[in-house]
């Protein structure tokens, strides 16, 4: 960057001299051969990625006022022996609920003690200590000066991060963007002593709220429940959907299973309406009282806070950039048969017609990536809980990282072979068993 300095002259288009491939910014600079404004753009983007990562991992957007303040979730975590209620959540219990521990946040002495079996992983006080170290992925404890836990908040990383299990199952290095399919969000929320905010919103008693939350199971969450109050599908099964990965999204137009909007729409939606952070949100589509009775009644599409009290909006730009920067992980060597995958690739773009919708290398349509339930050969229940009544073509990169819990929005297909069999039937593709297996190996290779 030597020789780069700010210039106020407006005639540096010549600085785009072709020596810096990919440079698109013709302004600024002027030193021999240097594309200073272009460099500043890249440095600025790197700064946004770092800031967005902090937000994704650690920002609660002030939601501790809800999870701690209103629901008292921290009291259930602490347990009665530590000033809370109930048995408390020990580290082993937390891991069983799918919570993950960031090994990088553990001091070396503690790591040694855990290795030597000197830490009681059945003691909720140890969970409190882990929260004090900021070591529980996606969960932040609030502590007073005396070290007592007075609240708890959640982050994006709670649902959209796992760890690599390098230390022990559930304990390791962070993997931002991976869907946490072990996480039992419903069971965690159900343990809160006071569920009256949900009971009042949904117009039911707290026991009903608890029953609904417990019906979700691991890896699932129902983002639409607080909008339409629908807890179960017509067939009686839970209305919750799988937690999707939050990587590999750059270039993809609409997001979420049912294409609610772009990343920045959904981030504002989730931070305000689901995490209960303190910000502003506008979406008049939620005024549709026949589709979203609860959202319409509570004017959820019209949340506005003054600029100096808005803890979400100022963070959306960097968070957006970070989301787009998260790339899908590469499948581990040996996790698929490369020869079969190559044959599967040919089928994907040929006889099986998959690339008609899953257009490589995005694996979704460039453009309006939405399809009706009838096109997909599945029921319309979840599609109808969204503004466009459709399902979004899922980007397929990194499928291997979220095979737990099944595929499609509600995990209705337990395996990739089940997905392919469904397409084979629905589209009348006439694929042989071997061809279907080849397609599966290809999907595992993405
Ligand atoms: C309680 C769990 C939970 C938390 C916390 C959460 N999400 Fe999500 N996220 C979900 C679920 C479930 C969906 C799918 C929703 C749907 O389709 O209705 C989703 C969808 C998404 C998508 C769309 C992915 C795709 O396939 O297109 C993005 C992006 C995303 N979340 C980012 C975030 C960010 C950023 C945050 C923090 C501001 C966040 N999420 C917080 C559970 C969560
Ligand atoms: C008409 C467009 C269309 C075609 C053709 C199509 N898909 Fe899909 N695909 C979708 C949509 C839409 C979804 C999301 C369905 C849902 O969430 O319920 C999806 C979901 C998937 C998923 C699940 C992703 C996840 O995260 O759970 C896989 C795997 C998949 N498709 C593979 C294929 C294969 C293989 C083919 C070819 C045999 C194919 N698709 C053909 C539109 C299509």
Image (spheres, rainbow, N blue to C red):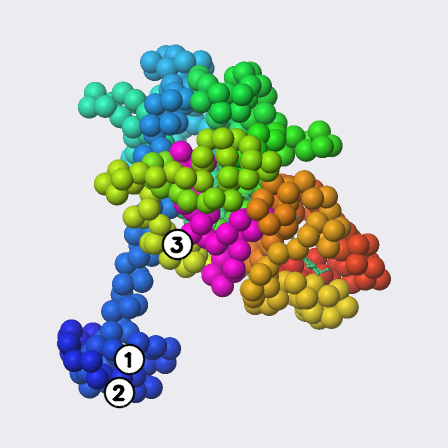
Name the main secondary structure of what is drawn in magenta.
Answer: loop
Q: Nearer the viewer, residue 307 or 211?
A: 307
Find residue 380 and report its image quarter: top right
Residue at which label 3 appears: 320
Q: Residue at x 15, y 76 (%)?
A: 8
Tags 1 and 3 touching, CB below 8 Å? no
- In this picture, which residue range is highlighted in magenta? 247-276
Lower sequence index among marks 2 and 3: 2
51 lies left or right of 363? left
Q: Can you give x and y, in whole percent of width and height, for residue 50 in the image?
A: 31, 54
Q: Residue at x 33, y 28 (%)?
A: 65
Cα separation between marks 2 and 1: 7 Å
Lower sequence index among marks 1 and 3: 1
Cα separation between marks 2 and 3: 32 Å
Find residue 282 and report its image quarter: top left
Tags 2 and 1 touching, CB below 8 Å? yes
Q: Can you give x and y, in whole percent of width and height, for residue 373 in the image?
A: 70, 49
430 lies left or right of 420? right
Cα separation between marks 1 and 3: 25 Å
Q: Residues within 10 Å of mark 3 (few under 14, many from 20)?
A: many
Residue at which label 2 appears: 14
Q: Nearer the viewer, residue 312 or 249?
A: 312
Residue at which label 1 appears: 26
Q: Is residue 251 magenta?
A: yes
Q: Is residue 347 magenta?
A: no
Which type of secondary structure does the marked residue at label 3 adopt? helix
274 lies left or right of 405? left
Q: Nearer the viewer, residue 225 or 324?
A: 225
């Amino acid at each position: 960057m030597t020789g780069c300095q700010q210039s106020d002259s407006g005639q540096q288009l010549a600085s785009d001299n072709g020596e810096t491939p990919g440079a698109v910014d013709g302004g600024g600079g002027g030193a021999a051969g240097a594309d200073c404004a272009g460099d500043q753009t890249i440095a600025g983007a790197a700064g946004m990625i770092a800031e967005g990562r902090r937000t994704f991992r650690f920002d609660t957007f002030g939601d501790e006022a809800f999870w701690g303040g209103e629901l008292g979730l921290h009291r259930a975590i602490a347990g009665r022996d530590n000033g809370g209620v109930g048995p408390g959540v020990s580290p082993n219990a937390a891991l069983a609920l799918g919570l993950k521990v960031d090994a990088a946040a553990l001091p070396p002495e503690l790591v040694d003690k855990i290795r030597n079996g000197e830490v009681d992983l059945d003691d909720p006080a140890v969970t409190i200590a882990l929260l004090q170290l900021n070591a529980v992925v996606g969960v932040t404890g609030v502590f007073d000066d005396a070290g007592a836990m007075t609240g708890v908040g959640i982050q994006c990383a709670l649902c959209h991060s796992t760890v690599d299990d390098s230390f022990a199952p559930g304990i390791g290095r962070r993997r931002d963007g991976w869907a946490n399919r072990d996480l039992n969000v419903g069971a965690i929320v159900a343990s809160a002593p006071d569920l009256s905010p949900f009971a009042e919103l949904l117009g039911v008693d707290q026991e009903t709220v608890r029953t609904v939350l417990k019906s979700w199971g691991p890896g699932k969450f129902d983002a639409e429940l607080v909008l339409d109050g629908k807890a179960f599908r017509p067939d009686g099964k839970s209305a919750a959907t799988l937690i999707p990965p939050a990587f590999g999204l750059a270039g993809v137009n609409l997001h979420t299973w049912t294409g609610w909007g772009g990343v920045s729409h959904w981030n504002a939606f989730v931070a305000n309406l689901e995490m209960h952070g303190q910000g502003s949100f506008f979406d008049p589509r939620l005024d549709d009282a026949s589709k979203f009775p609860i959202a319409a009644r509570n004017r959820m599409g019209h949340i506005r806070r003054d600029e100096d009290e808005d803890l979400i909006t100022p963070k959306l730009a960097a968070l957006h950039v970070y989301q787009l920067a998260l790339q899908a992980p590469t499948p581990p060597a040996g996790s698929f048969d490369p020869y079969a995958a190559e044959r599967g690739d040919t089928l994907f773009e040929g006889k099986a017609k998959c690339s008609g919708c899953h257009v490589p290398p995005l694996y979704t349509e460039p453009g309006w990536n939405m399809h009706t339930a009838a096109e997909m050969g599945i029921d319309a229940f979840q599609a109808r809980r969204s503004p466009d009544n459709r399902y979004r073509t899922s980007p397929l990169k990194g499928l291997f990282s979220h095979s737990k819990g099944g595929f499609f929005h509600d995990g209705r297909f337990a395996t990739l072979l089940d997905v392919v069999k469904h397409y084979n039937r629905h589209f009348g593709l006439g694929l042989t068993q071997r061809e279907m297996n080849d397609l599966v190996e290809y999907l595992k290779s993405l």
